[in-house]
Amino acid sequence: MSHPIDFVKMHGAGNDFIVMDARPADFPVAQVLNQIPGLCNRRTGIGADGVLLLLPSDKTDYTMHYLNADGSEAGMCGNGARCLARFANDRGLPEKLVFTANQLRYRAEVFEQYVSVYFPVEPEPVVKIIDGVTWFEVHSGTEHVVSIDQMYMKAPDRYFREKGRLIRNRVDLFPTGTNVNFASILDQNRLRLVTYERGVEDLTLACGTGAIATAIARSYSYFNENSDVPPSSEVDHHIQIDCPGGPLEVSFSVIREHDKPVYKNIILHGPAVTVYEGRVTL
């Protein structure tokens, strides 16, 4: 039986999504989940990096459910969270929102030009040496590894695709896979980032949780190289991450405790843009 479904196409710095209001009791959630690869196909479907569902919640304003373009579970999606917050606000929910994603409570604030999402996570970076290259493993709501090297400034997309695919599929190191981030330093508080995303299996124009992971990795690297940071002194950081699709901003606090940095008060700021509205029949 065919079922017409309204959707909105949105993007956050080029990271694009099919967004649907799944709160009505008759919304065919299972049917949508089964057809995500077809919906996200850029030649025969709507085309997107993933699908966002706005689901009801008894304890928060809504529940966010995000799936990758291949239909797999993605963990948290920072750009998607900002888009879904604007989508919810456009449909009558307040500008200051609380939502549930992967059993965690997040906060979001919708502004005219951008949306901020507050992450209830405190990442603990781990250094991994892979084939002689230093990587920082950072869980920023989902799995990421980050390499910071100036050589990435001149590397072609072909390099990022090949290397990203290789690291993403190192199941000996990452049993469930990982997202792979290649960063270069532009100045003290600004980095350039290219991300190979698991589930999309390609480069994306931006990655919100990748931007967070990269900002944390940069701070962690600096922290390890500068032992003169006083203990128990909380420092606020604001780092701009330049993605191919546009800039994102990550702010957070860091404090040295027991000779290691602790990261908290993480906020992702960036655009959340509606491209068009449509209807698809499943």
Image (cartoon, helix red, strand yellow):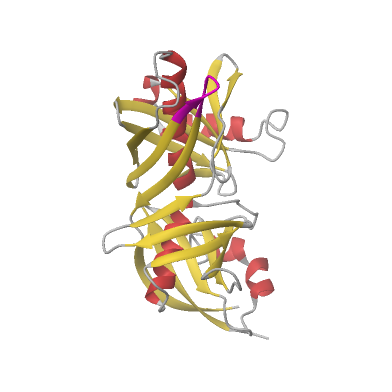
Instruction: Residue at 45%, 29% (x, y): give it.
Output: 255
Question: Which residue: 49% across, 64% down?
Answer: 98
Can residue 207 be seen in this snapshot?
no
Percent position (x, y) of residue 184? 37, 26
Determine if the magenta segment contains residue 53: no
Farthest front residue in view: 232
Residue under the image location 45 percent in, 40 percent down? 212
Image: magenta residue range: 255-261
- Residue in the foreground of this view, choosing between 216 and 31: 216
Of 281 and 259, nearer the camera is 259
Residue at image point 54% right, 44% down? 121
Quadrant of the image occupied by residue 67: bottom right
Quadrant (top left, top right, bottom left, bottom right) of the C terminus: bottom right
Q: Is residue 126 left or right of residue 234?
A: right
Q: Where's the N terminus, which quadrant? A: bottom right
Q: Position of residue 138 (x, y in %)?
A: 55, 34
Q: Nearer the viewer, residue 16 or 191?
A: 191
Residue 259 part of the magenta-drawn span:
yes
Q: Is residue 21 left or right of residue 71?
A: left
Q: From this view, report whether residue 209 is shown above or below residue 217.
A: below
- Up the image or down, 239 lies above or below 81; here it is above
Residue 190 place in picture, x, y as percent: 30, 32
Task: For residue 234, say whether it is visible.
Answer: yes
Numbered marks: total: 0
Q: Main secondary structure of the magenta part?
A: strand
159 lies left or right of 38: left
Q: Residue 231 at what x, y percent from top left?
A: 45, 21
